[in-house]
Amino acid sequence: MCPDCEDFARTVVMLGQLALYAETTGADLDFVESVSPSLAMSLPDIPPGHVPNEGPEYPGQGW
């Protein structure tokens, strides 16, 4: 995996974890509101030439 792709995937995972945390009882919503915009802005650009829907076919696709 290319370095930019790894950064993108890692950041998306952290955003997902932050969203899950925001839904938990007793979550510090001030923390979520202050961190989420910065984390979203840190998403790297999609690498040049990357086509998001291009890739291997998975079972059930292309039949």
Image (cartoon, grey):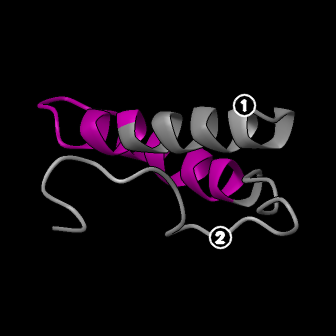
Q: Main secondary structure of the magenta part?
A: helix
Which quadrant holds residue 45?
Answer: bottom right
> Nearest the camera: 4 or 56?
56
- Residue 51 inside the magenta-drawn segment: no
The residue at the point 18 percent across, 29 percent down is 26
The residue at the point 29 percent across, 33 percent down is 21
Tags 2 and 1 in contact by the CB under 8 Å rule? Answer: no
54 relative to 18, above or below: below
Q: Secondary structure at mark 1?
A: loop
| Residue located beneath label 2 in the image | 51
Name the image quarter holding the N terminus. top right
Which quadrant holds residue 7?
Answer: top right
The residue at the point 72 percent across, 42 percent down is 5
Q: Amino acid at mark 1?
A: Met
**Image label count:** 2
Q: Secondary structure at mark 2?
A: loop
The reply, left or right, for residue 13 in relation to residue 60 is right
How far across and down, in percent of the image, does residue 25 sit? 11, 31
In magenta, the rendered stretch is: 17-40
| Residue located beneath label 1 in the image | 1
- Mark 2: few, some, or many residues within 10 Å (few <14, many ≥20)? few
> Nearest the camera: 39 or 46?
46
